[in-house]
Image (tube, rainbow, N blue to C red):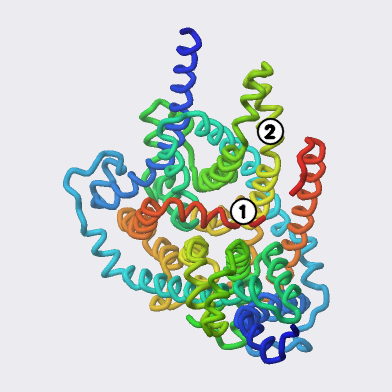
Amino acid sequence: MLYQIKKVIFVIFLHIFLMSVALSCIFPFIWMMNVSLETQTQYDQDYGLRPVTNPNFQNYKTVIIDEGFWRYFLNSFVYTFVTVIFIVLVSSLAAYAFSRLNFPGKNFIFYMFLAAMMIPLPAGFVPVYTLLQQFGLLNRTGYVLAMTNIGLSISIYLLKTFFDQLPRDLEDAAKIDGCSKLQTWWHVGLPLVMPALGVVIIFNALNVWNEFVLASLMFSKDSYMPLQAGLMQFSGKMVTEHTLIMAALTVAALPIIFLYLKMQKQFVRGLTAGAVVG
Amino acid sequence: MKASLKDNTASFSFVLPALLIFLVFYVYPFFYSFVLSLTDYSLIGKFNFKNSFVGLQNFKDLLVDIDWWKSFYNAGFITFFALTFQNILALLLALAVDKVIRMRKFYRVVFFILPVLSEIIIGLLMKQFMLSEPTGRDVLNNILNNIGLGFMAQDWIAGHNVRLITALVHCWKGFGWAFVILLAGLQSIPDQLYEAARIDGANTWQQFCKITMPLLMPVSTLVMVLTILGTMQAFAMILALNQGAGGETTVPVMIIYNHLGTGQAGLACAEGLILGAILVVVSFTMFYVSKIIREKYGVVPN
């Protein structure tokens, strides 16, 4: 009896601890959405700390349409989409070859990719930026190629280890039926590696979507700017328009939070992929 | 059966796209930055090694550049908090979530929201939250006054505690990531070990010291190494939060970013190389130390 009471008190204590940390994670976002629905006058009075009774959606309209956040959004989406497609194609081809095919120098090339994964270039954006400038590639193509490279090594590694665990029977059958290597990769390899591709896609998509440094250096024009760089520029321009900044932040954060809630497992696996590899 | 030349070429073409991108955007820049670091190239016109060559001048300048080394102190300060405060908090949370049965999933989902969002969003949100008059509203100070903690009210963005506050915001953003990895590590420890220990009469504390700690060692070393590497290169969140607060929270990558932004590519490359060299030394030391610790605890290194 005494043991049980002690245990219940202990669990309650644990929940209080966990709950207070959880609140600290949730509260700022509720406050953010609350402020984004206020007018500047309301905000001056209650600091966004009282729940809004008459939501005002004007801020969203200003931010998305007048301030062009729809364009930042579209740009981010295009960069992310194209980069992820590139990475999936290029890395699955390479991973398939590293796992299944034979050619001279295979191991050397694979270890080179591994080494690159272990030794990330700190401030690698400096030589990459200079290089792109020399090639006249300070544009969307250059950005997508540079971002593709960033996710490449880890994606190849993840897919290669997954391929290694798969049985070869299906591919042998495909070969006997007369499939070429490329056909086998496309019709057999890719469908089999789908579960690992999910992790690769989430990992790289978040990486590109959240990327700021290279984008802010490369794109000074609004029409090419992705979301993070746009947010930064907007907050510098609108220092005193607090409700507008909050609306912009809500627009940027909510879709990601929703996606995350829908696909928690993939997000966690994607974001901790780097750690698992090490 | 020896593969034919045609067969080899076909196989090799599978890795060719990856290899090309890798050579152009990783290998070449890697060596290129050594070359650039010896010049004062300013991003104007074509790069010409002979005309812009300055020898080791960039490194000599940096050696006595107080701002540059102060940025290491700032980053080291934040890293120290990330290593201690953030990771201990993450470990405590992981242990707690591992114990409670109810709402386990809820906590896991909530704690991981912050690592999912971008550094810019977190930085700007916290800036708005902590901003003070006259440009903003004293939201945080107002809350503190209302709950009777008015003595804590201060200038959070540019006051004299700004380095500590930046470190805490960094920990706040990062703890969920460490939490998830440590929790996975905890849950991979087989229950039989604890059962056996209980039968042998070990109390909770003994179980923690003799089972949990040593078996969690590989995972926590990994978390520590990645925390150091990640925090020493942290930058975007701090830029969004307080732009370096006049040197108080300037970190190395921020200086590199600013120098590149003003066109000092040669200097920025030299700075990148110094940062890289220091990080390589730090992470190798960490791996070496962790190997010794693991051997001491009798855990086979993997």
Callout 2: helix, strand or loop?
Answer: helix
Pinpoint the chain carrying mark 2: B
A5 left or right of A103? left
The residue tagged 2 is B213
- Residue A207 at least partly seen: yes
- Residue A130 at least partly seen: no
Q: Position of residue B160 (x, y in %)?
A: 57, 42
Nearest the eye: B64 or B89 = B89
Q: Which residue: 68% across, 48% down?
A: B222
Tags 1 and 2 touching, CB below 8 Å: no
Question: What is the crowding at mark 2: few (fewer than 14 residues within 10 Å), some, or many (at least 20)?
Answer: some
| B157 vs A20: above or below | below
| B155 vs B122: above or below | above
Pinpoint the chain carrying mark 1: A
Question: What is the crowding at mark 1: few (fewer than 14 residues within 10 Å), some, or many (at least 20)?
Answer: few
Q: Which residue: 50% across, 70% down?
A: A216
Q: Position of residue B235 (x, y in %)?
A: 58, 58
| A103 vs A201: above or below | below
A142 left or right of B63? left
- Mark number displayed over residue A276: 1
